[in-house]
Structures are given as C-alpha cells and as structure tokens.
Image (cartoon, helix red, strand yellow):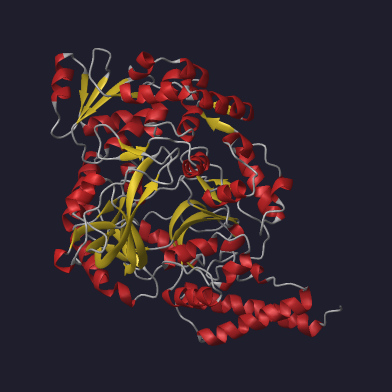
Amino acid sequence: MKVSKKDKDRLKQLRATVVHHQNKYHTEDAPEISDEAYDALLNELQELEIKTEGRVNTADVVGGAVNEAFSKVEHRVRQWSFDNVFTEVGLHDWDARIKRLVKEGDHDAASVSYVAEHKIDGLKLIVEYEAGNLVRASTRGNGVIGENVTHTAKTISSLPHKLSAAVDLICVGEVWMGKKEFEKLNTVQKGAGKSVFANPRNAAAGSLRQLDPEVSAARKLSLTTYDIDLFDALDSDITEPETQAEELQLLKQLGLPTDKNTKLCKNISAVQKFYDHWVEKRETLTHDIDGVVLKVNEVSLQRLLGYTAKAPRFGVAYKFPAVEATTVVEDIQLQVGRTGVLTPVAYLRPVLIDGSTVSRATLHNEDNIDRLGVRVGDTIVLRKAGDIIPEILSVLLELRPQKTKPYKFPNKVSECGGDGSIERIPGEAAYRCVSTDSGTLHRQRLYYFVSKGALNIDGVGPKLIDLFLDHGLISTYCDLFTLTEGDLHHLPSFQEKAANNVIEAIDAARTVPLYRLLIGLSIDNIGEETARLIADTFGSLASVMQADRAEVSAIYGVGETVADSLVDWFAAKQNKQTLEDLLPHLEIINPESRKGSTALTDKTFVLTGTLEGLTRDEAKDMIRNHGGKVVSSVSKKTDYAIVGKEAGSKADKAAELSVSILNEEEFLKLME
C-alpha cells in the first residue's frame, strides 16, 4: 500500500510534538497541555503508525516494541544498596561516623553537606548512553549481574532515547508506577479475572519485566534518575560534576527526569527537618516513597569515604517509621523448607499496611509462638518496618474468641515424606520432616538449585520448575541440563524466544563456582559463608568429597555439625548417584583460588567485639576479597585480631600470643 506524503508529514509532526510535550511534562515540570490532550495525540500517532508502517513504532519516540527478551548484563559499575537508619539517634550516629572518617582523611568535617532526596519505592534501573544515544537499560540484579530490560524501558515515556548532548553516560534511576495508574491497572486486572498487584512497587517491577513491551507501554511507568555512575563529555563542553547536586542538575540538563523534591542540607539538623516534612506530606505525592536518601554532596569526599563490602559509606537510607496495623490470624500452617525444616506461618485476614496487602507472616518457630501466645482466631498487632516481611508484635487478648486453643505442632505433616512424621531438632526450637523424600521437598530443592544464591540460572524460578515438573520434562538436577528448545515449544504460552532464553541461561550456568554448587545441593547447614570456607580450603569438589569429618571440622568457622552434614551427604548412595549424573554437565571452578596474590593472601583474621562502621559479615567479605581467611578462634597461627567495642577473651588471648591487634580504623586502612 502506497503511503501518501500527507500521512508521512503528519507522522513526522506527531512524533516531534509528542516528544516535545514529554519533555515539557517530565523534564521541565511545565506541561503546556492536559493529560487528556496528550493521550489523544499519542493515540493518533499510534493509529497513523499502523496505517503507514503496518505496526506501532512508538518505541522510537515514547516506548519500546523491540522484540528481545531478557539476557544477563554485567554492570560496568557495581550497583550498591544503601544501608538503613530508622531513628533520629541512628541518623546522628551515621553523621558522626561520616565526619570522623572525613576528619581522619585530613578534610574539614565541619564543611560536610548532604543532598536529601526522596527514596522512591520502585525498581532500580541502570541506563547507558553512548554519544547521547540510549544503548541499554538493565535492572540492578545482584549488583554485579542484572537483567537486560531495554525493550521495556524504552516504553517509559519519561526516558529520552537521545540526550540533549552527545556524551557517554551511565546513570541510575528508579522506575515507579503512580498511585492512580496503579489503581487503574488493578481495576483492569480484576476485570480480566487476573490477580491484582499488592502495591505499586510490585506492579512497576512486574510491568518492566515483561517479554512483550506493549504490555509495559500500556501500564504507563515512570522514571526518576538520581545518580551518575560514569560520564565522558566527549566533544561537548560540559564539565564533569563535582557534587551530587551538580549531578542532578546535569541529568536534568541532558533531558533526563529528576525529582524536584530534593534539598541541599548544610547540616544533619536540616536533614531531619526535610525528613519530618515528608513523613507528614508523603501521602500528597503521586507515588510512594518510603524514606529519604542522604548522600555526601562532594564527590571527592564520596571517593574518600568509599564502600564497605555491601554498601557505600557516603550515603544512607533514612527510612520512615514502621507502620502498624491489626488483623486476625485465620490459620497457622507449617511450611516445608528445602532441608525439611518446618516453619510455622500465620495466614492472616488480608490487611493493607504501608501500601502493601499482607496476608501471611512467619512465626519462625515454636518458641516464638509460645512467647507471643498466638492462636488461630486471635487479633494481632502487625508491623512492617524497613522490610517486606511483616512481623507480629503482640496479641490483643481482650479480643480473643472463646474456646480457642494454644497451637501445638502436629505429629505428622502431609508434605513430609514417608508417613509424614516430624521430629524436633535436638537443641533447637525447630521441627523437621523425619523422611526427606517427599514431592514438596523435591520441588523446594530444585527451586533452590536454580536460585540466585546457588547456580543462578537467570529467568528460571519456581514457576518454570513447576511447569517442567508437571509436564514431565525434568525430575532431577541433571535433567535441567539435557533440555532443548524443542522440549519447551509445546509448553503453554511458551514462545520461541522465551525457550531460547531459558536454554541460553541453563547453558550459562554449566560453569559454576564450587561454593555455589555446594549451596545448590541443599546440604544441611551449608550456607554461603560455610560453602565459601569449604571451597577455599579444599579447592576442588573431588577433595571435598574425599574429606573426612576431622578435616572439615578443623576449618575455622565450620565445626563438627557442618562436618557431619557434609560427610554424611556425600556418603549417601542416592547423593552419589545425583552427582554421577550431574557432574558431566558442569564445569566446576573455584574463583577464590584463582585470585591474584596480595599482601594479605592466606593471612588469618579473628574478629571480636562490635565494629561501628561495619557489620561482622561485611568485615569478613572484605577480608576474603583480599585473599585472607576468617577464623573463629585465636592461635599462634592467627595473623590479625580485629578488635571492636566490648571485645571478649579473644582480644586478651591475641595480646598474650603477640598476635597483631587492629582497631576498626587500622583494619580499614589495611584493607585499602
């Protein structure tokens, strides 16, 4: 069909007009037309695209119709999450720590200022531009590896596909869904007989992680950028920002959306005033925020302060107060974990708390149930603070119905194997299945095997594992690595591109670090830290399999309980068969053993007392990243004792044995 010149000209004009009004609304905060008028322009543009080009190409201007599915992205700059503070006391402690570190770096602590920004409750997005052109958008993922969501990010109307200057840029922002759009989406979902989203954050995340970008485009996501990871001015005359405030100005100058509700605070009192204002006014916003993010303004000081193993030192999230609500416990059920441990879960009358509909809360164990005295039918006080996991605070006894009975663990649980018998774990308040051969446990182990903490098979989670199991495609770990694209094509709603992505993700997981494999095998008492210690000590799977109890328990930080679990697992006949089937499909590596030698390689460290600026796990990660080892007790072979506040007998023994003793500041300098 021949396209008229009139239609071509109109198409060109519409595209330019839509882009103009996008910039006026999202970048300049100065809309010239109403939302309804803008929607009419966009609808006409899409109709004309279908007429003249045979398909909606609005992705080139306002959205994405690029038909690509998720793939892994290795971030050029590691993505971090800020630590949290929840009280004014915690805020002042953080401020004091910042100023102490700045002073120790020979800078004027009194001159430290902060930029306060809204902590938007959304999904982190990393956006990359080359010579001013959008080339990629990805999720945070685990901070090192994220998901490529360029095809859906392009549907975000506030995300420019071309910057106002030809520069190289990696910026970071938050994808969110406004409250009104969230309500509209849930109305549509409910009308279609589909599940509604619990909160705008989940709706935004689910909308961005779509294979079909048209679904994302219909949901009207928004973006707010707030940070610059990399910047190269190229041939432009733009100066690289020297402060966080200047970074925000540059982002806006380049055409990227920023939050107008930010404030440069000269001191921590001004931060508290900003925080108090938005605690009261947050409901007036069009979107959800759950706190205030603070960053040291001067980029040079940010570099001086650096990072812990898990978070930047120069920034913190000051979370809004915990929100409490009351609801009724409708049932208490036991949930079977991957190792057969049973967790009691309270099923609640659904309640809206801090923007989320909550219907379950973990009761942890029998001791916690007894402490709370919670029973089915009780009215409880529920809290959701700085976390998505709700916590039961107390029971309102005056509202307890008559004839309620204390909860008692049953003798049998149908999800357990064998006859369903359960037993109490010696020395603990937890119960577990006596037999571990149930279908429920088998599924839990497969879920864990593919999870991010284990083999990290991208895009393969519980729903896909269930689909594969239910259709008879897999029954063991090994079966995952024998799947082909053809096996997946007949699955319901499984498109060719999705099948290809799954197979590519499985292939990528064939090369697996030893410690991740140890985690993925669901061996009792083997978590990440323990798995790392074992992998680092023995170096290969063959050595781990041949190790005896004495060799394993001799590893500092491991001990006899872990040694029993590990040795017993590898001795079991069915587990030997599992490995015999699985190992031909894997290449097992040990990244820890391949690290280059440093001055701290193989040095042993003992940690004792409380550190102010680091958690115990953060300090351990720093030591491991420098090639050192963390041990649990002091001996003549110990190289360093890191001593914090309220250190115990380990500090005394270190002094007695002439072990080098470091305080926190000396430790951090050593790490540098």
Q: Left or right: where does residue 57 sit relative to residue 34?
A: right
9 in relation to 410, above or below: below
For the N terminus, give its image quadrant.
bottom right
Q: Position of residue 3 (x, y in %)?
A: 83, 79
Q: Reply above or below: 386 against 184.
A: above
Q: Position of residue 592 (x, y in %)?
A: 46, 26
At x 41%, y 29%, the residue is 531
The residue at 74%/76% (across/down) is 50
Q: In the image, residue 329 lies at what x, y percent?
A: 28, 62
The quadrant of the rendering that contains the C terminus is top left
Q: Is residue 202 visible?
A: yes
Instruction: Determine the image quadrant of residue 350.
Output: bottom left
The answer to whether residue 480 is above or below residue 23 is above
Q: Depth check: 516 or 110 in front?
A: 516
When the figure is inspected, residue 346 is found, relative to residue 642, above or below; the finding is: below
Q: Which residue lies at the image location 33% right of the left edge and 19% below the top edge?
A: 553
Q: Quadrant of residue 479?
A: top right
